[in-house]
Amino acid sequence: SEHIQVTPEGYLLCYDVPIARIGEQLYTPEEVPDVTPGADGTVRVIRTPEEVFAPAAIASYQGKSITVLHPVDPDNEDEIEFVNPENWKELSAGVALNVRRGAAEFAGLLLADLLIADAGAIEAVKKGLRQVSCGYDADTVEVAPGVGRQINIVGNHIAIVPKGRAGARCAIRDALT
């Protein structure tokens, strides 16, 4: 496929993977405590091009770990655990390379090439685990009740997941997708 190649060592190199997008995403009130929930009990978070494509935000994903699913905090199973030097060897299945703003058909998307080196992760991708979800830190400013805007995005990892918050557009593609 033009989007997935196997390296001489047997790693998967996945090109032009949309890892994040601009626009609106839904969160629970627990995930965004700085924003008053809307009447439906959710928080809509706006991700603007100025923040998603800020040079510091883009740079923060360069070389970050790829994980299979989001790591879970062993002390609180409702919280995502960030990858750090103490758990990197256990959690990392590869790295993000060449992180960049998309253009043309990829406008509005943050792209990366994913080098997947872990045998289990390679097998999971081959079997169809393809959507991605970024683990990151950000500040959220309330714009109105039920609506927030993300600022100061700092990437930590890119999880390969069955269903990501950013939707099916943020996924490892093959020749057919």
Image (cartoon, rainbow, N blue to C red):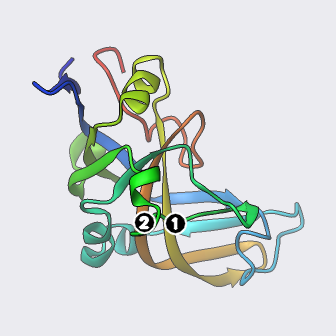
Of all residues shown, which one is farthest toward the left? 8
Q: Which amino acid does the dot numbered 2 rest on?
A: Asn
In x, y percent, where is residue 45?
Answer: 62, 67
Instruction: Look at mark 1 in the image and give the residue it sits on.
Output: 82
Which residue is rendered at x = 41% and y = 22% of the image? 123
Residue to which mark 2 is pinned = 156
Label 1 packing within 10 angstroms: few (<14), some (14-19), many (20+)? some
In which quadrant of the rendered view does residue 105 lie?
A: top left
Q: Is residue 108 visible?
A: no
**Residue type, numbered disc 1:** Phe
Horizontal side of residue 129 vs 54, given as left or right? right
Looking at the picture, how far across and down is residue 8, in whole percent? 10, 24
Q: Are marks 2 and 1 in contact (CB under 8 Å)?
A: yes
Residue 69 lies in what quarter of the image? top right
Q: Quadrant of the N terminus?
A: top left
Which one is in front, 116 or 139?
Answer: 116
Residue 92 point in image, percent of width and height:
39, 50
